[in-house]
Amino acid sequence: MHEVEIKALLVDPVHNSPVILLKDRQSDMVVPVWIGNPEATAIAMELQNKTFPRPLTHDLLKEAIIALGGEVEKVIIDHIQDGTYYATIFIQDSEGNVQELDARPSDTVALALRMNSPIYISDEVFEASAIELPLAEDDEEREQFKQFVEKMDLAEFKRLSQ
Amino acid sequence: MHEVEIKALLVDPVHNSPVILLKDRQSDMVVPVWIGNPEATAIAMELQNKTFPRPLTHDLLKEAIIALGGEVEKVIIDHIQDGTYYATIFIQDSEGNVQELDARPSDTVALALRMNSPIYISDEVFEASAIELPLAEDDEEREQFKQFVEKMDLAEFKRLSQ
């Protein structure tokens, strides 16, 4: 099992799709996970510590879990099938029992960021998907990340999100 | 307080944005609510009784509430401020206490559909926003709804949603 952190949130120019790079805390290996635009927005808002005037769906998910006395213990991206990544969210309920919820990695990461919960990747997924960090630890990486978040049109997003 | 049902899910050609028409169960008045594309997809999937291979964010929200012993008692679109609609989700926890969660109408409707919970609109919102049903109860309405759901490219959506 590998604990990871979000290293970058970029747009893959080949698929024109957002991708998050999840970096192993113990090495320079990263696992890229392609995600949808709404989930990318939910992740970017949290990475920027921005709050939207109204709760996004993942904010609502967080509030529902807290209101019901739950805690997100950890999330694990645990297997791949036919090119799709599967994840599990481990929620401890108010009686201390742990409930396991099947989820997409994108929702899992958006929620884990909001709950300050650790994100893990199973050895199986790590061995199948991890690559050397493709971006040097330099200004280029920071610039790409900056460009991605600046490209999001928050005014347009606000109009659509009531 | 007015109990409503989803009468149609259309694209507003002026704003090129999805809009749901919430119809009063006791009259022919409807309240139009403009929503975002991801929430429209979440609502359309449920209206069509389609299940996606992987849980959407609102499916995850439903599963989290159930796993923690909660029940969605009702949802209310309760006020409008500066053109934005506000809603509240009433969740009963496992001890019978009712928790109130602030939410956007779009998330509220997507969740209520999944939980078979009643959807209400306050008198204040109803008086400010209700209009006569703009579409006759005829083939045109059904055709517009059909066009909307057929326009959604599920293959593209699938690619982005892992």
Image (spheres, coloured by chain):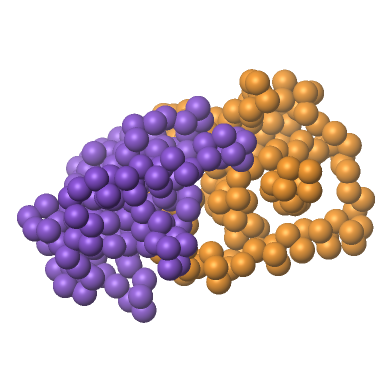
Chain colours: A purple, B orange
The residue positioned 39% from the left and 31% from the top of the image is A50
The residue positioned 79% from the left and 43% from the top of the image is B14
Towards the viewer: A147 or B158? A147
The residue positioned 65% from the left and 21% from the top of the image is B82
- What is the tally of numbered marks visible in this picture? 0
Query: At which x and y percent is residue B25?
Result: 78, 40
Towards the viewer: A16 or B9? A16
B148 lies left or right of B135: left
Is residue B118 visible in the rendered structure shown here? no
Towards the viewer: B153 or A58? B153
Query: At which x and y percent is residue B137?
Result: 90, 53
A28 lies left or right of B139: left
In the picture, residue A159 is in which quadrant? top right
Farthest residue to the left: give it. A26
In the picture, residue B84 is in which quadrant? top right
B29 lies left or right of B76: right
Query: At which x and y percent is residue B42?
Result: 57, 54
A26 lies left or right of A30: left
Farthest residue to the bottom: give it. A82
Q: Is residue A128 above or below residue B2?
A: below
Q: Quadrant of the N terminus of chain A?
A: bottom left
The residue positioned 90% from the left and 62% from the top of the image is B139
Query: At which x and y percent is residue A160?
Result: 61, 40
Is residue A116 visible in the rendered structure shown here? yes
Q: Quadrant of the C terminus of chain A?
A: top right
